[in-house]
Image (tube, rainbow, N blue to C red):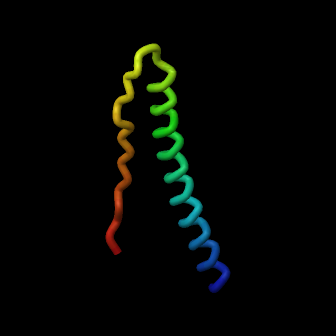
Amino acid sequence: MKAMKKLLERAKRSRKTQRLRQLLDRAIDRIRDGLAGPEPRLQPATVRVKRRKG
């Protein structure tokens, strides 16, 4: 029972970090794209993170 709980916690945490890493990667990509252009056209990189209460 205890081991199962630990596994579940780890899975949850890894899922969360995966999502965060994905969002970060996306933001970095957009910034890099903006810098790669000939004229400086940096649009604000929108990163939406839904926060759950509780």
Percent position (x, y) of residue 37?
Answer: 46, 18
In the displayed orientation, state which residue is furthest to the left.
53
Q: Is residue 14 left or right of residue 53?
A: right
Q: Is residue 28 left or right of residue 40?
A: right
Q: Quadrant of the C terminus?
A: bottom left
The image shows a total of numbered marks equal to 0
Q: Residue at coordinates 32% horizontally, 70% vertically from top-left? A: 53
Q: Residue at coordinates 54% horizontally, 66% vertically from top-left? A: 12
Q: Residue at coordinates 58% horizontally, 72% vertically from top-left? A: 8
Q: Is residue 47 above or below residue 10?
A: above
Residue 42's image quarter? top left
Q: Residue at coordinates 63% horizontally, 77% vertically from top-left? A: 6
Percent position (x, y) of residue 47?
Answer: 38, 45
Percent position (x, y) of residue 51?
Answer: 35, 61
In the displayed orientation, state which residue is furthest to the right.
3
Q: Nearer the viewer, residue 28 or 17?
A: 28
In the displayed orientation, state which residue is furthest to the front.
40
Q: Is residue 53 above or below residue 17?
A: below
Q: Is residue 34 above or below residue 52?
A: above
Residue 41's image quarter? top left
Q: Is residue 30 above or below residue 49?
A: above
